[in-house]
Image (cartoon, rainbow, N blue to C red):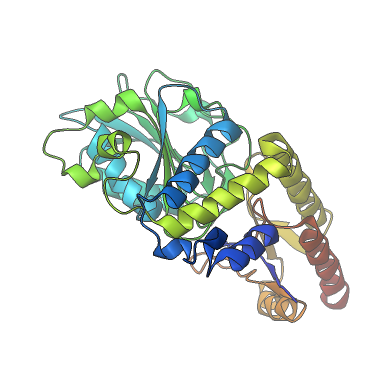
Amino acid sequence: MRAYNFSAGPAILPIDVLEEVQSELVDYQNTGMSIMEMSHRGKEYSEIHEETISNIKELLNIPEGYSVLFMTGGASSQFALAPMNLLCNDEIADYTNSGAWSKKAIKEAKLIGNVNVIADCADEIPTRVPSIDECNFTNNASYIHLTSNETISGAQWKLFPENTAPLVADMSSDFLSKPLDISNFGLIYAGAQKNLGPAGVTLVIIRDELADKCPEHIPTIFRYKTYIENNSLFNTVPTFPVYVLCLVTRWMKKIGGINEIQKINEDKANKLYKAIDSSDFYVGTAVKECRSTMNVTWRIKNQELESLFLEEASQHNLKTLKGHRSVGGIRASIYNAFPELGVDALIAFMKNFESKNG
């Protein structure tokens, strides 16, 4: 029996995808080889590569003038690569600080160039993301950076700044969870292991003209332009993670596309938040207007009971509900692939635990 896996990442994948991977793992489509054994320049992998790009463009209605890239190193590598490519000379980049991942991005950018933190609510409790009104934007900033969904704190941007500077977003934990107007962004990056596929591939969407900003001294392998010009095949692409990402995007299209996925995600999150808010036993940790649809965070008012909650939840096949080690508490990551039945099972357990311990 499969567990209900609430892990923040690496995270749950659609069961249909896992079963297809299983069936093709040793012998991919009667080639006598696993996809992991094939050349990244061969016909079979090339078809997967192109389909994955096409599916992502279709799901998000990505306009002309943007490229979809497959890179490595997770979002952590992009914390450095974005300013290396986009922050030139004496320019200033605007950063919002809404939590742990924003802090990491700011730290890396400061090693490379001038950074202006235009809003900072990272240490506030309850947690939130900045409002657009409180952002002190720099005139002629090189770009504006934000973390769209703080996985640890469970706070998420619902509206994005509209500014003349390109918007750069770390979307690792909510990419492809809802529609986006891509034309509002200059650069989006996302580690795959939260909401897209297995660890190993980092998805990047970039407005092509921004890649021309990269200073000449940046090594070739670290330039976005290199990946654009070589269709992400300058070096060996992580073929197996891209293959799984291809299957995930097929699954997304099959169940109705990005609008249907948004509806499902909102229904799941609303159910769980309603269970928290209707109780005097549990308390949410994020400001209601900023609550994440991907990572739901809460505490038990009597925090001494949280270890028992987690232990008993695991016994009921509700796994990896422990909050991040830096903040504690309880966190349910309910990404695209997480089934609504798992949310229902969690809510039933929460009510039963409260009745016994409240």
Residue at 82 percent across and 56 percent down: it is 275
Q: Position of residue 212 (x, y in %)?
A: 24, 26
Q: Seen in the image, is 74 located left or right of residue 269?
A: left
Q: Quadrant of the N terminus?
A: bottom right
Q: Seen in the image, is 103 located left or right of residue 278?
A: left
Q: Position of residue 128 (x, y in %)?
A: 56, 44
Q: Nearer the viewer, residue 265 or 303?
A: 265
Residue at 30 percent across and 32 percent down: it is 93
Q: Seen in the image, is 265 located left or right of residue 45?
A: right
Q: Seen in the image, is 109 located left or right of residue 334?
A: left
Q: Position of residue 44 (x, y in %)?
A: 46, 51
Q: Nearer the viewer, residue 267 or 351?
A: 267
Residue at 77 percent across and 59 percent down: it is 343
Can residue 81 be seen in the rendering of this structure?
Answer: yes
Q: Quadrant of the C terminus?
A: bottom right
Q: Position of residue 288 (x, y in %)?
A: 68, 43
Residue 139 lies in what quarter of the image? top left
Which residue is situated farthest in the left direction here?
Answer: 217
